[in-house]
Amino acid sequence: MLVEPFGRLDQDSALRQKLLPCCRLKKGDIWVDPASHHRIGVCDATKKSDILNLFGKEKATLAIQDPPYNVIVGNENTHNLCKMNLHNYMAFSQQWVENTLVILADHASIYVWLGADQKDHFQPLPDFMMLMRNYDELTSRSFITMRNQRGYGTQKNWMAVRQECLYYTKGQAFFDVNAEYTDIPKILRGYYKEINGQVTENLQRSKSENIRAGNVWVDVQQVFYRMPENVPGCYAQKPMKAIERIVKASSQAGDVITDFFTHSGTTLIVGELLKRRVISCDIDEIFAEITIRRLEHFRKTGKTGWQCGNPFPEVKEFRIENLDIEEDDEIPRIQTGTQTTLF
Ligand SMILES: C[S@@+](CC[C@H](N)C(=O)[O-])C[C@H]1O[C@@H](n2cnc3c(N)ncnc32)[C@H](O)[C@@H]1O
């Protein structure tokens, strides 16, 4: 079974040598979208000069940051992935957080996706929470958990099936508990209550319009190769549904939103669909190129990703083939016991 015959794009140096000449941006370059004025740069999120150059005079009302998590998932014997030591990871985090504060508007929201390594004192989540306490202008608002698919493989250890997202605001940030946000289904059955003489069951009552926004997201399918939004090679792609929920709740049409770690370009596609202007970057030219191509592909075909197709048709090695998977199989790209991912 060959789901992704190529390895991680940031680690496969032979493939990188083939892809790099296809990238229109080099380090420090910025692409300005002629149609909707989005901006995509090859920038280092930790470098203030890069971020100021990317933003110019613009300010963002929403930042959705999805940095590398510093967590190894899966079978740690099979890969040569290395974690940063926590001290260095926190220095890295402090730099990009401070750069985010520089470009945030007076009234703004910031969401940060993170992991917690259960084999290593849950780093970096608690350390990151402590870091965020240092910024008086930020108010903590919610600690969201998004459920991943259940894992396969070893029966011995706990399988991490969650990703964490911390939500903070600055000033009087916009927040709309829209239908999408309150759409999260109740998953506990069997709690009955009498309402207006009628016995109602828990699941039935979850359809009420007055339900509060929940911070345990159990209704988001992790991206895998059968989904139209799949971007081959992007090992840490976030589902559009999760990003849409954030964008709809914490921004309005016409707002500038940002994401310093664009990777597959999920925030850009969601921003385009919801009429936000996106200013985004990645340190890696290849992910910046994929992000721009994803937008172009969307405008040309109406498709939000390539499913099993090839974002770089000019590089024949970059191709998913030999799919011999049962129709109903759900093979998430990350968090499985057979694959090791550092994200
Ligand atoms: C977890 S992924 C982001 C996934 C993204 N939200 C998506 O849906 O596709 C992290 C990305 O951060 C990028 N990255 C790592 N260090 C960076 C830095 N210092 N500045 C900018 N980008 C960085 C990596 O190249 C990688 O593409």
Image: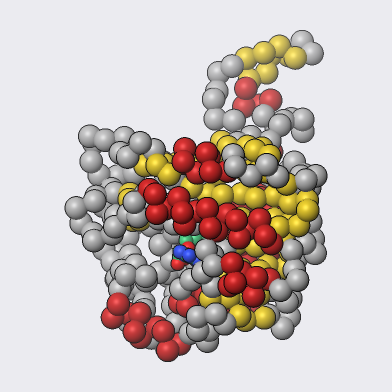
- Measured from the top left, where is residue 279 in percent x and y? 66, 69
In the image: residue 21, left or right of residue 53 = left
Q: Position of residue 272 (x, y in %)?
A: 69, 68
Instruction: Give the farthest residue toward the left.
Output: 77
| Residue at 54% over, 73% down | 43
Residue 222 vs residue 340, the one in the foreground: 340
Q: Is residue 338 left or right of residue 312?
A: left
Q: Quadrant of residue 341?
A: bottom left
| Location of residue 298 (image quadrant) | bottom right
- What residue sits 43% from the left and 44% below the top? 124
State the scheme by which the image is colored: secondary structure
Q: x, y (%) of residue 129?
A: 53, 40
Please say whether residue 229 is visible from this viewpoint: no
- From this view, report whether residue 44 is shown above or below residue 95: below
Query: How many discs mark residues in the rendered view?
Result: 0
- Give the camera-side residue of 199 and 132: 132
185 with respect to 337 (left or right): right
Q: Residue at 50% of width from left, 84% of height from top?
A: 26
What is the quadrant of residue 97 in the picture? Answer: bottom right
Quick check: 9 above or below 21? above
The one nearer the camera, 342 or 138, is 138
Rendering coords of residue 285 (x, y %): 47, 78
Q: Residue at x 50, y 53 (%)?
A: 93
The image quadrant where one finds the C terminus is: bottom left
Q: Is residue 203 above or below residue 108?
A: above
Residue 187 in view of the camera: yes
Quarter the N terminus occupies:
bottom left
